Image: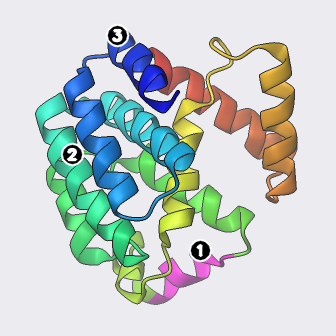
Amino acid sequence: KALDELNKYADQTIYNFTEMTRNIGLFTNAGVDLDESVAAIKGFSNAAAMAGTDSTRASLAMYQLSQAMSSGSVRLTDWKSLESANITGERFVDTIKETAKAHGIAIDDMIAKEGTFRETLKDGWLTADLMAEALDHYTLSTETMTEEEKKANRERLKSLGYTEEQIDKLFALGTEATNA
């Protein structure tokens, strides 16, 4: 089922199925749940597309991300690899910040203390689960979901602590990312 989903996704994007299967292996080998891996790969690919990153650079960054996630958190060193792939733009950072806020992480205070978002990462607060959740937001396209899926995703996000306003923004982000 996971491979079928990635194959369908690969047909809709610049990413080929070989890259998708390689990446699913990296993520699951890193200990990320299969369904979470599929969502993270699709989300990361969509984020890369929004940033204008080509599939080769995205694939290399995905390798680094899988290694970071296997360690349990994304740290500053890992972030620098994502920066070199041109993926860590303002929208990407904002998505991670909104995800952190929904989970009660005082990211704005951390940024004020450390000076920049990237400097906060040295403390390891960006867990693999939090990153996977942030990446999943890039797959929330209202154009590809049924009404039932929209409702289920809305309820899931509410249960995770997101406000209605945040959910609407995440659906808009997911739609834009999928279209990218």
Q: Say which of marks 1 and 3 sits in front.
A: 3
Name the residue located 19 percent from the left edge and 41 percent from the top edge.
59
Label 2 and label 1: CA atoms lie apart by 23 Å
Between disc 1 and disc 3, whose residue precedes? Answer: 3
Task: Name the spot of residue 82 as percent of width and height, x first.
Answer: 24, 56
In the drawing, what numbered circle is on residue 86? Answer: 2
Between disc 3 and disc 2, whose residue precedes? Answer: 3
Classify 151 as above or below 97: above
Between disc 2 and disc 1, whose residue precedes? Answer: 2
Crowding around mark 3 (Cα neighbors within 10 Å: few <14, some 14 to 19, many 20+) is few
User: Which structural element holds mark 1?
Assistant: helix
In the image, which residues are magenta? 105-113
In the picture as drawn, the residue positioned furthest to the front comes out as 1
Answer yes or no: do the residues labelled 3 and 2 have beta carbons within 8 Å? no
In the drawing, what numbered circle is on residue 11? Answer: 3
User: Which structural element holds mark 3?
Assistant: helix
